[in-house]
Structures are given as C-alpha cells and as structure tokens.
Amino acid sequence: MGFLDRFRDRVKSIGDGSGRIQINDPRFDDWETVHQFEDLATGLAWRDVLREHGIPAELTSDWELDRYGRGDIHLQVPPGMWSDAEELVSGLDLE
C-alpha cells in the first residue's frame, strides 16, 4: 500500500467527506454526547439548532452509516457545554 492509499484511508476514517458527520475522528473523543440518533437527517436538524443558538456541535459516529444514512449517531458538544446544550434540546421537546 502506497502513501496516497494510506492517506486516503486515513481521511475516510475521519469523516464521510461531506462535513455532515465525523466518522471515527479522535478530535471529538473528549466531547460530550447530548443525544443519540438513528438517522442522519434528524441528527443534522438538531445539530443545526444548537449551532444557531451559538453552541458548537458536531455529529459523530464510530462506524460508517448505512446507505440510508442510518447508524449510531451522536450529537456532541465540547467539554463544559453539555448542560447548555441539554437545556436547549430538552426545552424543544426532542421526542
């Protein structure tokens, strides 16, 4: 396996290329999970709500999503921001 092949594999392991979800990205290991979702569309909507309210948020997963955008998706925020994010999400009736 050449250098470019290893580089492509590393990039693929960090995200899906869209910037919508971070796959197996160690930069978010210390971030806190606010909520888990099964589908990307719902996760993106809630991520955007947090961002619109000034809370940095990312969607992460340890594994690639299936072809329908489903999987184990975590809505995460930086350390120390969980309570603000949780208050906002719970106040908007997530379920």
Image (cartoon, rainbow, N blue to C red):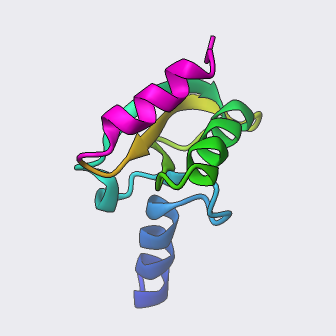
What x and y, as percent, mark residue 45? 71, 39
User: Is residue 81 in the magenta section?
Assistant: yes
Predominant secondary structure, magenta span:
helix
**Left or right side of 53 for 70:** right
Is residue 65 in view from this perspective?
yes
Is residue 62 in view from this perspective?
no
Q: Is residue 9 above or below residue 77?
A: below
Answer with the quarter of the image where residue 86 lies. top left
Kindly identify the residue that appears in the image at 46 percent across and 56 percent down: 56
Q: Is residue 67 above or below residue 11?
A: above
| Quadrant into which the N terminus falls | bottom left
Tally of numbered tags = 0
Answer with the quarter of the image where residue 70 lies. top right
What x and y, as percent, mark residue 24? 39, 51
**Left or right side of 29 for 22:** right
Magenta stretch?
Answer: 80-95
**Front-most of residues 58 and 80:** 80
